[in-house]
């Protein structure tokens, strides 16, 4: 199964790597591309994908957990607990469907 | 509080009349992935050789995993060290090399092998491997020891970017599973900045800079503004580098508070630029060369 989100890094941005991950998760939550209940890729998956320090991924996830956006379930992974999408984004599909009628 | 995986105090090593390393005082925190940066001949390899007991200090002291690597050689079994160029027996096959490691390391972990050696035929002679394959084999031998500290000396030299990335992926995957401190010596910062959370910058004068990468990036800023005589700037603790054109001034500074002066544009700095600035020899700023104008009558 493909992960719900794939991270990318901009090394020259001067933004700390963990913050880039945090921002990309928040952005995806705002846009509604990931939603409550979705599982974020595991630390090892991100490490294998980006070849970055596992501590960095763990730090990003801790930060998200601190903000109440995700919960870590021991031995299972990290799951989205809260969305940042406004009601309008959540209803986009519904609206679009209505427009097509 | 666990012991630092690597600590040095006033460490120096002299080769004849020349110092290969001097005034080296550093502490590496447990579990850190350390970029050991610095120009060629700054003493990076010397430091790693001292850490593995291959060299004896001329002055000062070094401890690895709380032990003196010269007096307590048992600690070497807990360190994985890959010297520059990943030296291996060229006439051995891959399988023989692994068998050799299995028999000489009491803590050998076979589980590491298949993951590392996909796409390499086990009967291939080591001398016939590509640089990337040889680097992967050397890394497998080291991680198979289940080390608590991994020391890698310029592991990316001769690797193409893809092989370099694969090397890091294997290393980081292993580190994700078992907490291990890693020190990667490299003169190319772009190769290590993806992974390191701690930096030690060696120059000929000793340890020029060390610390947590995020803290270093958080405390340094680039300021750009119109050229002017430099007094003190509120929020700036130290100016690391000053560059100017005719009209513009660009400073790399250490901040201790946010900079509020609106005449400066304040931007974050990348790790590579930060380290390059500290690597540059400390020298007084060159005065602008006086222009040779023909004498003119202004009367």
Image: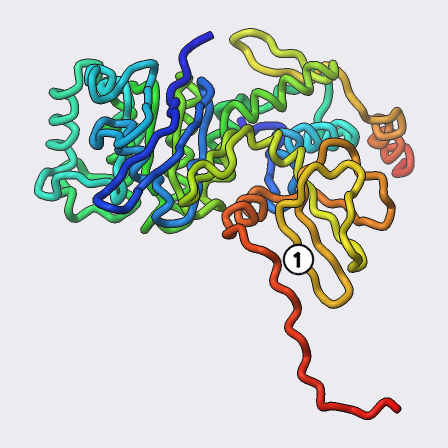
Q: Judging from the image, what secondary structure is the residue with disc 1 in?
A: strand
Residue at the disc numbered 1: B243
The residue drawn where x is 32% and y is 51% is B158
Quadrant into which the C terminus of chain B falls: bottom right
Q: Residue at x 39, y 20 (%)?
A: B180
Q: Chain of mark 1?
A: B
Q: Is residue B284 left or right of residue A83?
A: left
B275, above or below B299, in the image: above
Q: Quadrant of residue B10?
A: top left
Colouring of the image: rainbow
**Is A19 placed left or right of B155 in the picture?**
right
Which of A62 and B55 lies nearest the eye of the viewer? B55
Image mark count? 1
Snapshot quadrant of residue A71: top right
Query: Can residue B244 be seen by looking at this rendering?
Result: yes
Residue B232 against residue A4 in the figure, above or below: below
Where residue B79 sits in the image (x, y, percent)? 28, 22
Decide if residue B140 is on the left or right side of residue B195: left
| Quarter assignment of residue B182 | top left
Depicted A54 relative to depicted B282: above or below? above
In this orientation, which residue lies closer to the viewer: A48 or B157?
A: B157
Q: Is residue B258 left or right of residue B239?
A: right
| A98 shown above or below B226 | above
Task: Give the residue drawn at x 11%, y 32%.
Answer: B96
Q: Residue at x 46, y 24 (%)?
A: B32
Image location of residue B85, percent across then percent down: 25, 44
Task: Give residue B228's position: percent from left, percent from top.
Answer: 80, 57
Q: Is residue B110 visible?
A: no
| B139 and A43: which is toward the camera | B139
Observer-nearest of B93 and B21: B21
Q: How many other residues sit within 10 Å of disc 1, few (<14), some (14-19) or many (≥20)?
A: few
Q: Residue furthest front?
A: B299
């Amino acid at each position: 199964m493909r992960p719900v989100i794939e991270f990318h890094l901009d090394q020259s941005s001067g933004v700390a790597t963990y913050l880039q991950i945090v921002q990309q998760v928040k952005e995806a939550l705002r846009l509604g591309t990931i939603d409550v209940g979705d599982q974020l890729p595991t630390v090892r998956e991100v490490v294998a994908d980006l070849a970055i320090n596992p501590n960095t991924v763990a730090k990003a996830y801790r930060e998200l957990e601190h903000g109440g956006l995700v919960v870590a379930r021991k031995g299972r992974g990290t799951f989205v607990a809260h969305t940042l999408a406004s009601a309008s984004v959540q209803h986009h599909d519904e609206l679009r469907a209505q427009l097509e009628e | 509080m666990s012991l630092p995986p690597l600590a040095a105090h006033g460490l120096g090593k002299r080769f004849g009349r020349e110092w290969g390393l001097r005034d080296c005082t550093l502490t590496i925190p447990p579990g850190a992935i350390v970029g050991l940066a610095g120009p060629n001949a700054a003493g990076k390899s010397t430091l790693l050789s001292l850490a593995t007991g291959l060299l004896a200090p001329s002055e000062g002291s070094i401890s690895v995993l709380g032990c003196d690597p010269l007096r307590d050689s048992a600690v070497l079994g807990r360190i994985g060290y890959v010297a520059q160029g990943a030296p291996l027996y060229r006439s051995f096959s891959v399988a023989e090399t692994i068998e050799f490691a299995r028999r000489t390391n009491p803590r050998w972990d076979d589980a590491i092998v298949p993951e590392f050696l996909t796409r390499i035929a086990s009967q291939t002679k080591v001398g016939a491997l590509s640089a990337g394959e040889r680097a992967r084999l050397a890394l497998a031998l080291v991680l198979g020891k289940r080390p608590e500290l991994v020391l890698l000396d310029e592991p990316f030299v001769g690797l193409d970017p893809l092989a370099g990335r694969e090397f890091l992926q294997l290393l980081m995957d292993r580190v994700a599973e078992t907490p291990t401190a890693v020190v990667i010596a490299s003169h190319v910062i772009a190769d290590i900045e993806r992974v390191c959370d701690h930096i030690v910058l060696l120059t000929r004068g000793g340890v020029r800079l060390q610390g947590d990468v995020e803290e270093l990036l958080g405390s340094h800023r680039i300021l750009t503004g119109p050229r002017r005589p430099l007094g003190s700037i509120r929020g700036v603790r130290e100016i690391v580098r000053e560059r100017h054109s005719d009209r513009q001034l660009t400073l790399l500074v250490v901040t201790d508070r946010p900079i509020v002066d609106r005449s400066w544009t304040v931007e974050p700095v990348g790790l590579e630029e930060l380290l390059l600035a500290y690597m540059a020899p400390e020298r007084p700023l060159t005065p602008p060369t006086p222009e040779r104008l023909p004498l003119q009558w202004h009367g």
